[in-house]
Amino acid sequence: MNLEDIEQNALTYLGQVTNPLVQVSVLYDHVKSKADEEIFSLHDFTEFLKQHELIKFMDPLSLTTSQVMAESLEASGLTSSPCSILASRVPSSQDLAASMVEQLASMTAALTAALGEARSIGDTEKAHNVYNTLERIKALEEKLISFTKSS
């Protein structure tokens, strides 16, 4: 498989996947599975992605300062592995804010139910903690809405 075929397979995959942010190792495995012969190493593939003008490369570990923080990212469902995304699929700040507001609404619904449950069983400490969390979510949601109006 020549470099143009590798590039085309990577671009096609990044353009078709549901989640536009793809771990580099997953993309590499996909491209490698399409090859009839051995392609270059994961390291070389990563370097290729970093230089490509149509692909954005992200390395979350470069943002972390410790192994504990990396493990915390993983535990919360965020990857600490290098990822790539088509530049054309990077969401706008408006889209990100709207998505965050939706997620906050979902969290609010779950926490409201938890608050009701804590109150019904008389767990005042838990109710207090959930209430404080709901207040923080409300403040964050107001900031996001303000951001979307000013952008």
Image (cartoon, rainbow, N blue to C red):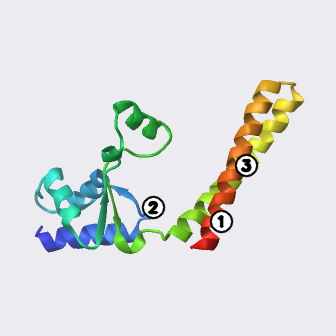
For the N terminus, give its image quadrant. Answer: bottom left
Identify residue for label 2.
Answer: 19
Mark linked to residue 78: none
Residue 139 on image: x %, y %: 69, 52
Q: The residue tagged with tag 1: helix, strand or loop?
A: helix
Q: Nearer the viewer, residue 10 or 80?
A: 80
Mark linked to residue 146: 1
Residue 106 appearing in the image: no
Residue depicted at x 40% and y 46%: 79
Identify residue for label 3.
Answer: 108
Residue depicted at x 64% and y 59%: 143
Q: Are marks 3 and 2 in contact (CB under 8 Å)?
A: no
Q: How many marks?
A: 3
Amino acid type at mark 1: Ser
- Vertical side of 96 occupied by 116: above or below: above
Amino acid type at mark 2: Asn
Mark 3 crowd level (few <14, some 14–19, many ≥20, 10 Å Cα): some
Toward which corner of the image does residue 80 lie, by quadrant? top left
For the C terminus, give its image quadrant. Answer: bottom right
